[in-house]
Image (cartoon, rainbow, N blue to C red):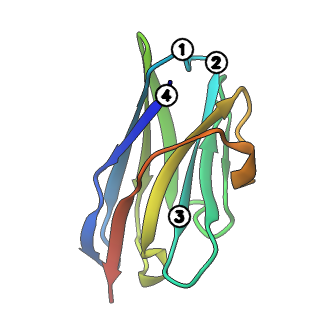
Amino acid sequence: QVQLVESGGGLVQAGDSLRLSCAASGRTLSNGAMGWFRQAPGKDREFVAGVSWNGGTTYADSVEGRFTISRDNVKNTVYVYLQMNSLKPEDTANYSCAARKWIATQRSSDYEYWGQGTQVTVSS
């Protein structure tokens, strides 16, 4: 069984930075891919960033150049971080991390395990 726990959300102003963390534990995920998704009220869930088992990364166009995803494998826990810079009001959403095997994709349906999410609110 895999557990994903996010942290680091909060209320910030436009232009500020925020760092989200996700701890994935419960089974070996060292060969797993991790992704960050977000969902704003009334909108569909959308892909934000992903990191594959080998460190390869992929980003949504809307966050490219502003957000950075990284990972750190420590024993049976994978820590995934999302550094968010130059935040905009349109980045306001509930952010969730997710896990799947091997390669990060941009489709939420590809991911097997999900965390509960952490709220990010960016005021103008």
Disc 1 residue type? Thr
Marks 1 and 3 in Cβ contact (< 8 Å): no
Residue located 33% across and 89% down the image:
124
The residue lying furthest to the top in this view is 75
Residue marked by disc 1: 28
Of helix, strand and loop, which one carries label 3? strand
Q: Residue at x 41, y 70 (%)?
A: 86
Give the amino acid at mark 2. Answer: Asn
Query: Disc 4 on helix, strand or loop?
Result: loop
* Residue 31's disc number: 2
The answer for how far apart the CA atoms under marks 2 and 4 are is 14 Å
Q: What residue does disc 4 label?
A: 2
Residue contact between numbered discs 3 and 2, judged by CB atoms under 8 Å? no
Task: Kindly indicate whether the residue at mark 2 contacts the one at mark 1 (C-beta within 8 angstroms).
Answer: yes
Disc with the residue nearer the chain's start (1 vs 3) = 1
- Of callouts 1 and 4, which one flags the residue occurring earlier in the amino acid sequence? 4
Q: Nearer the viewer, residue 2 or 47?
A: 2
